[in-house]
């Protein structure tokens, strides 16, 4: 099996100027998509997406993901419609998710919050508003009159994806979304489990799971020195092993003792200490890291599990600029169906 495309998942922790430079290089090199996050309280995703669409020519741009707690769903509809005017609706993927861990870490979790229901109602609202229609229902998780609509006619259609991690949200994505963006740390085993949950939700809407675009961050690091490339993923892998939901690890096939050793080290002394406890087995399970041939082989396992669009994420390689060329060149040529 091959992929429909190969993209990048960028960070919002560095200067926006640097993020735009990477996106513009990805555009010029022929990569298919750049996904822009809104991690904690770093750079804002809507401004970054607008700037990226305005300064690139063809690459797809994903809002990955927008949160209906920090922005009212009607504002999200306005943002999506405006971004589509900037770059064209065919270049935009608009992701929506609850970001529960972040909301709790920042103290933003509303009293009585219902993350699942709020995401479902937000997607329903976006569908209506972005089609130029009235909201059409009385929401329970945000204030809104059923007669509310945007004051302009949006261009479209705009793809709406759900950022999902657990089974219930995955099934909702299968039922109501155009696609899903899986979380930060994934494995082929987790992709396979996710597709089963997506299929359950899709069946409720009387459609096939194959109608959904399954995209995901994939921890990637490629370079000419295999040892250096694999070492580059260890610290971020340690951090996310410490904080991800249980299902991500449980479905991966990772050795529980290896995972426990990393989590203990991170909890006691931080991600750098955890990195020293990351085994080769854990790198093989959760990352595509090594030489070009290594990464091609490892991506193949994700493709076989049912992933459509991998988003190379985080380190890219010991030399990120060279890694970008390798990803867009020999790796994309080997793994993307044309």
Image (cartoon, helix red, strand yellow):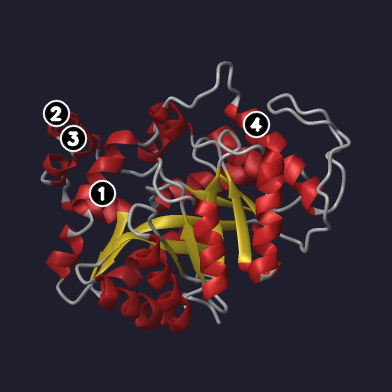
Say if 194 sits above or below 327 in the image. above
36 vs 264, left or right, is right
Pointer 1: what residue? 236
Q: Quadrant of residue 60?
A: bottom right
Residue 252 position within the rendered picture, expressed as x and y whole percent measured from the top left? 36, 44
Within 10 Å of the Cα at label 4, are there few (<14), some (14-19), or many (20+) other Cα atoms?
many
Q: CA distance from mark 3 to mark 1?
A: 11 Å
Q: First in sequence: mark 1 or mark 4?
A: 4
Q: Disc 3 versus disc 4: distance between alpha carbons?
A: 32 Å
Which residue, given by chain and number where applicable, does mark 3 sit on?
266
- Report the residue marked by disc 2: 268
Return the residue nearer the eye: 57 or 98.
57
Which SS class for mark 4?
helix
| In this rendering, position of residue 319 left or right of residue 40 | left
Give neighbour class at mark 1: few <14, some 14-19, many 20+ (Cα, 10 Å).
some
Mark 1 or mark 2, which has the lower sequence index? 1
Q: Is residue 331 above or below residue 51?
A: below
Q: Position of residue 197 (x, y in %)?
A: 58, 41
Q: Residue at x 65, y 39 (%)?
A: 172
Which dot, 3 or 4, sits closer to the camera?
4
Numbered badge on residue 118? 4
Q: What secondary structure is found at the residue carrying circle 3?
A: helix
Measured in 3D between alpha carbons, the distance from the residue under mark 1 to the one under mark 4, in whole angstroms, is 30 Å
Q: Nearer the viewer, residue 103 or 148?
A: 148
**Residue 186 in the image: above or below residue 166:** below
Tags 3 and 1 touching, CB below 8 Å: no
Q: On the image, which quarter does residue 98 sit in?
A: top right
Mark 2–mark 4 Cα distance, whole angstroms, equals 35 Å
Q: Earlier in the sequence, mark 3 or mark 1?
A: 1
At horizontal 33% and vertical 80% (from top left) the residue drawn is: 325
- Residue 330 rendering spot, x and y as whole percentages: 36, 82
């Amino acid at each position: 099996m091959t992929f429909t495309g190969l993209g990048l998942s960028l960070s919002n922790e560095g200067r926006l100027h640097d993020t735009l430079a990477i996106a513009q290089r990805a555009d010029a090199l022929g990569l298919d998509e750049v996904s822009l996050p809104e991690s904690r309280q770093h750079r804002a995703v809507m401004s970054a997406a607008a700037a990226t669409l305005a300064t690139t020519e063809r690459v797809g741009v994903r809002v990955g993901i927008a949160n209906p707690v920090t922005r009212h769903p009607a504002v999200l509809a306005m943002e999506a419609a405006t971004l589509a005017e900037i770059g064209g609706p065919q270049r935009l993927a608009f992701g929506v998710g609850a970001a529960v861990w972040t909301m709790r870490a920042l103290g933003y979790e509303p009293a009585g919050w219902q993350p699942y229901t709020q995401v479902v109602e937000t997607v329903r609202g976006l569908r209506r508003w972005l089609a130029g229609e009235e909201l059409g229902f009385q929401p329970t998780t945000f204030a809104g009159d059923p007669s509310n609509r945007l004051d302009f006619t949006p261009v479209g259609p705009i793809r709406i994806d759900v950022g999902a991690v657990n089974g219930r949200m995955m099934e909702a994505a299968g039922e109501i979304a155009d696609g899903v963006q899986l979380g930060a740390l994934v494995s082929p085993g987790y992709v396979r489990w996710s597709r089963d949950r997506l299929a359950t939700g899709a069946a409720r809407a009387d459609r096939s799971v194959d109608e959904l675009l399954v995209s995901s961050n994939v921890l990637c690091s490629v370079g000419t020195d295999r040892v250096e490339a694999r070492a580059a993923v260890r610290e971020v892998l340690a951090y996310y092993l410490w904080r991800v939901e249980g299902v991500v690890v449980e479905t991966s096939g990772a050795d529980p003792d290896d995972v426990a050793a990393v989590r203990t080290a991170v909890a006691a002394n931080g991600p750098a200490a955890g990195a020293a406890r990351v085994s080769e087995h854990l790198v093989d399970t959760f990352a595509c890291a090594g030489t070009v041939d290594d990464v091609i082989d490892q991506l193949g396992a994700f493709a076989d599990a049912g992933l459509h669009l991998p988003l190379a994420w985080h380190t890219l390689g010991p030399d990120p600029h060279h890694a970008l060329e390798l990803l867009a060149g020999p790796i994309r040529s080997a793994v993307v169906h044309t």
